[in-house]
Every structure is written in structure tokens, then in C-alpha cells.
Image: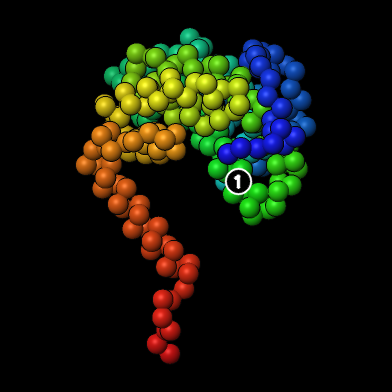
């Protein structure tokens, strides 16, 4: 989406602060979350890098859920997102954990979960969501929503940490990094990475069976003008047809009866 310069994020190079700087320089108690203020967030954020995967599992819930409730961006979302980006290379979470570790809780590695959260949050502040919000709430939405503006400003700093993981040896991690990177590079300083991400997207489609990941990258490649017909498999075609039927059904529900109802 093209926006005039007066209403953009005022793009500028952004350096990712260290996690310690973020913890110590942020007035967490003054920042709004979905359930009050962010006073308790530092304790959860610190536990994200605990050596014990069980502790990290609970920390993901405690630190991230309060700042992303119902797909909303809160005042505390940006410092949390920057902190998450800053710990992606921490030794405690930087490598995939063994599936045979008895202490390991079921589910994805911490690193994948953090990348998934960054990507989901970035999609909540992407151009499409912004356009929908402006259509619903008026063109002043972007100027008045400081939280979304702040997150969109932070995208280059977050991307700097995510980009490193695009070539990770573990496929789950590099695929999660790709899906997280896609909405981040909508920032004007990052659109030059589109060609590189297109290559990563094609490699994902050649190997991944993850429905969510495939949907994300196929939609992205189409939006970027690529012909994806040779990249789709039978599962993709079936999913696309299913979504089309669902959209048509929903449109009929919202649009009312096609003819006078029988009464």
C-alpha cells in the first residue's frame, strides 16, 4: 500500500537494543497491556532465556499473552517485541532442543514460538490490517494509534534479528523466520529484501507440509506478482478451493437471502 510521506513511519535505520538495556530503560509499570500495566512483564521476559525448557514454556505465556490479546497492539507490545528479538540468539534458546529430552514439554522449540509470535504480531500491524482499520475507523486511525505506529517503526530493528535465522540449519526455525520476516519487510527500508525472501519462500514450498506456512508464503508470492501455479501441490489447491467455498458461504450469510424468504 502506498502512503504519502506525512503519514508513514518516518523510516530510519534502527539498531536493536540489548535485552539488558530494554529491561532497565523501559518504564514497564507505565505501559498498558491487555490486563493492566506491564509491571510484571520483566520477570516473564527474563525467564524466556532460562536453561530449563519447562520454565521457558511458562514464560512464553506470561510474557507474551498480555501484550497481544485479541490481535491488538498495546503500549507494552513494542518493548516486548524488541526484547524477544534481542534474545533470539541467546544460547539457551538459539538451538533446537532434543525431542528425546524428558524435560522438554510438548510443542515447538522456544525459538520457533518466539518467531511465530513476532510474525503474528507483525501481521497485526501490517499494511492490510492498517487499511482495514482505516476503512472501519477513519483515516485518522493511523495518526491516533501510537501503539501501531511504534511497532511499525520498530520493524527494521526486529528484522535485523529475524533475518539471521533465515538460513538456520533447522527447517522449522528458518521457516518460522521467513513467515515472521514477510510482514516486517513492508517497512520502506526493508522492501529491498523481497527478492531474497522470494527465494526462501520457493524453497519452503519445495519441502514444507505446514499448512499455515504454505498459505502465508503462497499469498505473499501472489501479492508480489509471482506465478505460483507451478509451486502449488494438491493440498494447496484443495485448501484454496476450501477457502473459496467458505468465503462464498460467508458472503451469502452476510448478504442475506438471494430471494425473498418463505414467509
Label 1 residue SS: helix
The residue lying at 73 percent from left, 16 percent from top is: 24
The residue lying at 37 percent from left, 27 percent from top is: 201
Percent from the top left, x then y, of residue 135? 63, 53
87 in relation to 260, above or below: above
Percent from the top left, x then y, of residue 236? 28, 41
Quadrant placement of the C terminus: bottom left
Quadrant placement of the N terminus: top right
43 in relation to 219, above or below: above
Colour scheme employed for the rendering of this structure: rainbow
**In the image: residue 16, left or right of residue 239:** right
The residue lying at 41 percent from left, 76 percent from top is: 258
215 in relation to 83, above or below: below
Q: Report if residue 62 is visible in the image.
A: no
Percent from the top left, x then y, of residue 189? 60, 22
- Given residues 58 and 172, the one toward you in this image is 172
**In the image: residue 36, left or right of residue 173:** right
- Given residues 135 and 208, the one toward you in this image is 135
63 in relation to 87, above or below: below
Residue 98: image quadrant is top left
Residue 200: image quadrant is top left
- Given residues 127 and 90, the one toward you in this image is 127
**In the image: residue 258, left or right of residue 137:** left
Find the residue positioned furthest to the top.
91
Q: Report if residue 14 is visible in the image.
A: yes
How many numbered marks have been drawn onto this rendered protein structure? 1
Residue 80: image quadrant is top right
Percent from the top left, x then y, of residue 131? 60, 46
The residue lying at 71 percent from left, 32 percent from top is: 5
Tell me the crowding category of disc 1: few under 14, some 14 to 19, or many 20 or more residues within 10 angstroms, Cα based.
some
Residue receiving disc 1: 131
**In the image: residue 179, left or right of residue 209:** right
Amino acid at each position: 500500500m502506498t502512503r504519502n510521506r506525512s503519514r508513514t513511519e518516518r523510516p530510519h535505520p534502527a539498531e536493536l537494543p540489548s535485552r539488558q538495556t530494554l529491561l532497565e530503560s523501559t518504564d514497564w509499570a507505565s505501559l498498558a497491556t491487555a490486563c493492566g500495566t506491564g509491571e510484571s512483564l520483566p520477570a516473564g521476559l527474563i525467564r524466556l532465556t532460562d536453561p530449563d525448557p519447562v520454565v521457558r514454556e511458562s514464560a512464553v505465556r506470561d510474557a507474551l499473552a498480555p501484550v497481544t490479546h485479541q490481535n491488538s497492539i498495546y503500549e507494552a507490545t513494542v518493548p516486548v517485541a524488541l526484547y524477544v528479538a534481542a534474545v533470539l540468539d541467546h544460547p539457551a534458546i538459539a538451538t533446537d532442543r532434543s525431542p528425546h529430552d524428558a524435560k522438554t514439554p510438548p510443542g515447538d522449540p522456544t525459538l520457533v514460538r518466539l518467531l511465530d509470535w513476532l510474525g503474528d504480531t507483525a501481521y497485526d500491524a501490517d499494511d492490510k490490517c492498517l487499511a482495514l482499520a482505516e476503512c472501519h475507523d477513519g483515516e485518522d486511525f493511523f495518526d491516533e494509534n501510537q501503539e501501531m505506529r511504534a511497532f511499525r517503526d520498530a520493524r527494521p530493528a526486529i528484522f535485523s534479528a529475524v533475518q539471521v535465522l533465515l538460513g538456520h540449519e533447522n527447517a522449522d526455525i528458518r521457516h518460522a523466520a521467513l513467515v515472521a520476516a514477510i510482514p516486517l519487510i513492508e517497512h520502506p527500508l526493508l522492501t529491498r529484501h523481497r527478492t531474497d525472501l522470494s527465494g526462501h519462500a520457493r524453497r519452503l514450498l519445495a519441502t514444507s507440509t505446514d499448512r499455515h506456512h504454505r498459505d502465508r508464503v503462497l499469498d505473499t508470492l501472489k501479492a508480489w506478482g509471482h506465478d505460483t501455479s507451478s509451486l502449488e501441490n494438491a493440498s494447496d489447491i484443495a485448501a484454496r478451493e476450501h477457502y473459496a467455498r467458505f468465503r462464498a458461504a460467508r458472503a451469502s450469510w452476510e448478504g442475506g437471502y438471494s430471494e425473498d424468504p418463505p414467509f
